[in-house]
Image (tube, rainbow, N blue to C red):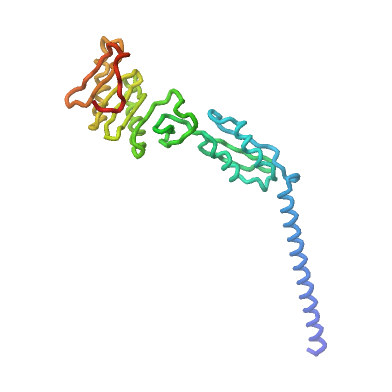
Amino acid sequence: MSKSTGNQAMKHRARGFSAGVVVIVLMFLLAAAGVAWVYTGMIAQERWPIRWLEIDGPFERVSAEQVRARLTPFVKGSFFTVNPAHMREATGNMPWVSGVTVQKRWPDTIQVTIHEYTPVAHWVDGYLITGDGKQFRVPAADDIQGLPWLESPQSQLELVFQNWQKFDDALNRIGQHVDVLVLNPRGSWSAVLSGGTEVKFGKGDIFKNLEMLVSTWSDLMQGQDLPPVSIDLRYTNGFAVLWPRNVDAIARTYGEES
């Protein structure tokens, strides 16, 4: 190969290299411009505005209007800038709200699902208990009617909750249920039944005592117009029954051993 031929080849490669660099630079600039255009479109509210805020839930304790009022300030951005985490935080601390699900639906919808606490019992210090044994607080909880009352030391919530369910299942066989169940700090159990009878189970085998009460209830009530005022099951071979004479004159102390 001659010297002139070699120089021509080098010039050709140089021109090819320069053209390749120019193409790469142009592609980079076009990509950057595209990214900038897309980003501008993403944050521009007028291009991708939120048109629909859908709110679902049971709405037994929380109203849809309350939730909408909380969330409206958060949906003024574009579809891409609305932050679901901020929306969950804004509604998650509302009374009676146990959880919030926030989903974006292309191209202009935010769907919010509200989950509410469902109380099944009262507990101490104004707490309510859910069906899975979790405690929560809401304003004026103690004013809620129709729920049983559970009482125990703080560390014994799980035990008193489980035993309440077992007591209620057994008492259903005699047409009764638990209105009040107490585990006092000394470890003694007592209850108030739906008919008003106070029952002292003591510290021993409380389920053996409960079965004794259930199995003898029918015989106990024969010829009686009113249920007993109290039943004390803390005896080895029997139990004591106090029948009403003048109910208004009888003082009752729940959860205390005599």
The picture quadrant where one finds residue 186 is top left
**Residue at figure coordinates x 35%, y 31% from the top left:** 151
Please say whether residue 158 is visible from this viewpoint. Answer: no
Give how far across and how far down residue 164 sits, in percent.
34, 30
| Vertical comparison of 134 with 85: above or below | above
Q: Is residue 15 above or below residue 66?
A: below
Residue at 56%, 40% (x, y): give it.
101
Q: Nearer the viewer, residue 215 or 227?
A: 227
Residue at x 45%, y 23% (from the top left corner): 145
Q: State the quadrant of the N terminus.
A: bottom right
* Image-quadrant location for residue 177: top left
Location of residue 31 by image quarter: bottom right
Residue at 66% over, 40% down: 73
Residue at the bottom extreme, as displayed: 2
> Residue 139, relative to residue 38: is it above or below?
above
* Frontmost residue, 243 versus 248: 248
Q: Residue furthest left?
A: 237
User: In the picture provided, is 179 more to the left or to the right than 79?
Assistant: left
Judging depth in this view, the residue of 169 and 255 nearest the camera is 255
State which quarter of the image contains the C terminus. Answer: top left
Instruction: Point out residue 255 in the picture as x, y percentages from the top left corner.
Output: 30, 28
